Amino acid sequence: MNRRAILAGAILAMAAAVPTASMAEWPERPIRMIVPFGPGGGADTLGRTVAEPLGQLLGVEIIAENVTGAGGTIGVGTMANSEPDDYTIGVINVSTNVIAPAVRDNLTYDAQTSFEYIAMLGGAPTVIAVNPDVGINTLEELVEAARNASPPMAYGSPGTLTMSNLVPAKFFSDIGVEVEHVPYQGAAEAVIDAVAGHIPFTGTTFSTARPQLDEGTLIPLAISTPERVPSYPDVPTFAELGHPDLTSVTWFGLAAPAGTSPEVVARLNAGVNEVLQRPEIIEALENQGFIVQLMTPEEFRAYQVTQFELFGPVAVAASQE
Amino acid sequence: MEILANVALGLETALEPTNLLYCFLGVALGTIVGVIPGVGPLAAIAMLIPLTFYLDPTPALIMLAGIWYGTTYGGSTASILLNVPGTTSAAVTALDGYPMAQQGRASVALFMTAVASFAGGSIGIIVMMGFAPLIAQYALNFGPTEYFALMLLGLVAAASLSDGPPAKGLAVVTLGVAFGCIGTDIYSGAQRFTFDSLNLMDGLNLIALAIGLFGIAEIISTAGRREPTMVTKDSVRLRAMIPTKDDRRRSWMPVLRGAGFGSFFGTLPGTGPSIASFVAYAFEKRISKTPERFGKGAIEGIMAPEAANNAADQTAFIPTLALGVPGSATMALMLGVLIIHGIQPGPTLMAREPELFWGLVMSFWIGNLLLLVLNIPLVGLWARLLLVPYYILYPAVLVFICIGTLSVQQNIFHVWTVAFFGVVGYLMRVLGFSAAPLLLGFVLGPLMEEHFRRAMLISGGDFGFFFDRPISAVVMCLTGILLAHSLYRTVRAKMKSKAGSAA
């Protein structure tokens, strides 16, 4: 090793130490954003739609990196266990930070302690939709039909432990009616079997069901948003039908490894919330089936905790069926 | 005459310079992606999605579709030359394509698969143009019982994929089913055979398994022996790719039948090109008067699956565009592109966006023609690859396999999967087991389980459900007849050989 190499190494070491030393300069290099799902999926498009304008706002590039597998928990684990260097963030969602922690014991992170929660991005609501030939037009009629059915009425979902499974599961268990859950490999497959009448009704993400709702090949009974969806005002929410706990969506948010500076978290939160208020972003996300929700870091963390309390037990019950 | 007006509208759209350019880009990229082992259409399309945000929806979809069917053209190349399937749907093409290459007939095989691909693609497009809405409605009749019955038929037909003693074939199918069980059970969310490893939660990667089983096993076994190569300078000249009269005579019907299977399976959500090519191959072998030629360079064995997977590529768009229901992950990505551009997919898409629909369909014609023109001159070039000595070629192939499998999910685990199945494949060769049934068990086994359990959940555990519904009842009966027929053939052959030895 010659002197020049040692000198270069010393300069590099100093450079690496600088960012944490002078917070005022942040950000001065690109930010790495770990997306725990594959390119083209919901988390990916949502993350990228927000990352680009957010990067412009902060004046640096935000580089998305897809680290996939095990229902997103590999990528989220990679992010959580990264150095909290203020330049590593990642997309998290309801399945990686609420459902998986409730039912699995092989995670490489703890949903409570491994993260700084930055900001909520938005969520895809669940809708209960029924095949028109069944002759049911309201949630009340569905409950009545399910109560009297023998064998129990079957409903489809995009998969075990997805929100479109857990929202109907919680609904029927809350009112004490037995139904049979039939999981599929994805929302599209569940929707097609409901349209074809192989199953009478299905829980699914709103965006997947929407073409069929437009056509009248499926009838929506209730949606899991806190308020009615502006572009689809005819569908009642669970909340207004007397089930305020079922205001739960397949949400996605941003987080950083625990130990990331509070200033950075605050600035990222402000940036995200500014971007999420732009009409063109709201529209772009709604086209993809996401309803934007704004939260402070504290609200986001509290939201995760309440979601865990509400759906953790339901998830455990569903996984032991 | 409505169809003529639609065709005219479609051609007008597809021939616009921008659309033509993106069509060319798509198919060219597709061919390359198809040739590289490990990177399939799903990965390539997913990587390009961000780019399509800046395009109009029509050229965006034309390009992505071009990649999708372009990979199927390219996928057979590595299968034939190196026994390394470029894409999953080309895995069966290796069974007879690679022996052809070893016999010095690589050029013929490459040329003929390009022709089969074109013919299959064309038939698929014609089906799509004429009957898209009708077929889409019909496909809705396929529920869990029908799928289960079809898969069962496929698996029984697949028993013919292996040579030698049926017990060995059965053992390998079972091994495939067992490997297919690894991962998260979709019904209970329970972990099966994952040994608490996060990497195994999603199950084994099909393409990694196929590359290991065929490609790596091939490389390992070549390393051990000094290969007297049949490939000479003569066999890569352009003239060498002209098929013999016998080749042409034998290819005709397999192409038509393959395209038929492909068009059918393509329209069913959840099946698609891979299963279409498996079934087409198994069917050809079963009805052939000389099934012993299969696996040793039978031209039917490359023509049928290549026609099938290309036809399926085209008809896969039917449920996606005519119903708004994607049949596979790749098709879901394409729908995603439409949605991002504010176009709601659904049953009325064809009426609402005739330019998009017919422009896309007519771009399939242009794309398939481009692929034919692009691939035939390449035959000479690809075949020349075989002149490269193995000690240079194989390390290079290994590097490509590693990069390809790693880049898709950025997870080193998939590279280990490839290596593991390379060893499994090699051991199977040494012990005289054929690997093809393993692949089939791996694909069909989990699908069968999924549909069987779903049918049971819906029917409340009533087995009669499979015979209550007309389509599944017919398919179940066919399976029964097939089983009875093979039993009869086996018994008769035994009797004959007994009578022969007695006389």
Image: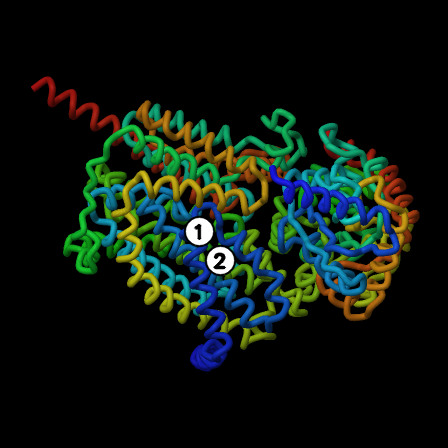
- Report which residue position mark 2 lands on: B316
Viewer-proximal residue among B144 and B177 = B177
> Callout 2: 10 Å neighbours few (<14), some, many (20+)?
many
Query: In the image, residue A209 lies at what x, y percent?
Result: 69, 58
Residue at x 24% of width, y 39% of height:
B296
Disc 2 marks a residue whose amino acid type is Ala
> Callout 1: 10 Å neighbours few (<14), some, many (20+)?
many
Where disc 1 sits, the SS reads helix
Viewer-proximal residue among B451 and B64 = B64
Residue at x 31% of width, y 31% of height:
B223
Numbered disc 1: what chain? B
Query: In the image, residue A242 lies at what x, y percent?
Result: 91, 50
- Report which residue position mark 1 lands on: B273
Asked whether the beta carbons under mark 2 and mark 1 sit within 8 Å of each other, the answer is: yes
The residue positioned farthest toward the left in the image shown = B503
Residue at x 20% of width, y 45% of height:
B231
Query: In the image, residue B88 lies at what x, y percent?
Result: 44, 46
Disc 2 versus disc 1: distance between alpha carbons?
A: 8 Å
* Position of B392 relative to B233 (above/below): above
Query: In the image, residue A168 lies at what x, y percent?
Result: 78, 45
Disc 1 marks a residue whose amino acid type is Pro
| Quadrant (top left, top right, bottom left, bottom right) of the C terminus of chain A | top right
First in sequence: mark 2 vs mark 1: 1
* Position of B223 relative to B105 (above/below): above
